[in-house]
Image (cartoon, rainbow, N blue to C red):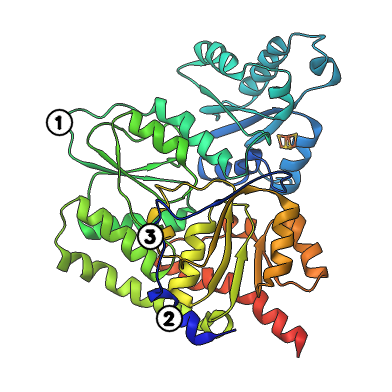
Amino acid sequence: MNVAATLAGCDAPKADAATRPVLRERGQREVFCGLTGIVWLHRKMQDAFFLVVGSRTCAHLLQSAAGVMIFAEPRFATAIMEERDLAGMVDAQDELDRVVQRLLDRRPDIKTLFLVGSCPSEVIKLDLAKAAERLGAQYMPRVRILNYSGSGIETTFTQGEDACLAALVPEMPAAEASAPKQLLMVGALPDIVEDQFLRLFAQLGIENVGVLPARNARDLPTVGANTRYVLAQPFLTDTAMALEGRGASPIEALFPFGAHGTSDWLRAIAREFGIAEAHVESVIAPGRERAARAIEHSRAALQGKRISFLPDSQLEVPLARFLHTELGMEPVEVGTPYLHRSHCAGDLALLPEATRISEGQHVDSQLDRVRSDKPDLTVCGLGLANPLEAEGFTTKWAIELVFSPIHGFDQAGDLAELFARPMRRRDRLEV
Ligand code: SF4
């Protein structure tokens, strides 16, 4: 491994993000489905309930992904479709009405109910939009009833959040034409991280700030032509389109990972709100320096090391940018289920020209490339990690990056450490 070459990587020629070649793949996939998003969304939206209309498999996935909640009233459940439903022997819409009625009678605390579609409900073409409309008319204003798909057909797990937030956009109140310019931060973040960003926006002097999703699903922020939205997650394509359909316009920036990514994200927001550069610098400098110091701890384990991402969380491009520009890693292949060129343009442009970008999934050919590339670290789904470890590869579970607080200055050290830990473990095993 040529460390000097990697260090120079940040200044090496970069491909144009709009035109750089992308290897497109289609084949067998190894990812969780969109139902997984319920695990973090139900924690975020504290008065919402997620009712999956699915099979026992869906129920098992949720139970094992989220753990069984013993002490609290759960905020998600599965209406299990039995063979009679699947065979069309009963009216599934009537059955669903009965389940929803029982649930809402028993749980007056539920203010927003999401009917979440699954593979089985889609296969029998159960129209959950129609169900949400019918039940919504019955239960409004006490409960808002919405629907989205979390099925594993043509999705990867972070699309569940995108579909859920996109379903909320039509419910957002319209901002008055005379309302002051509003910042809308989009993407579910742990409360602690969201609070850090809200404090930074306040210090910058941005007063009119909304967050999607709101912690209380009934407190949706307004949206309109005065709204400037900034994505905190790169996988929110449908949500972004829905917001633009309501008149909002995007703020483009790197995603807020690490010292550099977070600074760029905050600077782009501040620019949009006309805040003086000197003030912006004074607000972000302490956090940026803290972040830069924190990631130093992981540099020895990561600098000059080669990394491959298999397509999984859709966070791959911005994370590869962070590891390359801030820690001197060399991304060999960055695979992502869907490449959002416009949202990820800034991060994509900072990846070295030699990095192979792939979109879509074909497990066998991706594994063949890992075997031939021999990266020092492979970021992949749970199902692929064990077989790769057995072949002598060092791996990192992609899903851990979605469940851990990784955005912003104060999480930069932890984010770097998530990648450094498996490298150190490998080094210890090799000694
Ligand atoms: S939605 Fe589909 S992929 Fe997800 S658990 Fe249910 S059956 Fe499996």
Which mark, by number, is residue 196?
Answer: 3
Q: Which is nearer the N-term, disc 1 or disc 2?
A: 2
Q: Nearer the viewer, mark 2 or mark 3?
A: 2
In terms of depth relative to the viewer, which is nearer, 361 or 260? 361
Residue that mark 1 sits on: 178
Q: Give the crowd class for mark 1: few <14, some 14-19, many >=20 residues within 10 Å.
A: few
Q: Cα distance, mark 1 to mark 2? A: 50 Å
Residue 239's image quarter? top left
297 in relation to 123, above or below: below
Q: Cα distance, mark 3 to mark 1? A: 29 Å
Residue 392's image quarter? bottom right
Query: The disc labelled 3 sits on which kind of residue?
Result: Gln
Picture residue at 61% right of the left edge, 40% below the top: 38
Residue that mark 2 sits on: 8
Picture residue at 53% right of the left edge, 65% below the top: 355
24 in relation to 99, above or below: below
Q: Which is nearer the N-term, disc 2 or disc 3?
A: 2
Instruction: Find out if the beta carbon at label 2 lies less than 8 Å from the nearest ligand 1 atom.
Output: no
Q: Is residue 307 left or right of residue 177?
A: right
Q: Is residue 332 visible?
A: yes
Can you say which quadrant of the picture contains the C terminus?
Answer: bottom right
Q: Is residue 68 left or right of residue 271?
A: right
Q: Nearer the viewer, mark 1 or mark 2?
A: 2
Picture residue at 73% right of the left edge, 52% below the top: 363
Q: Is residue 140 left or right of residue 51?
A: left
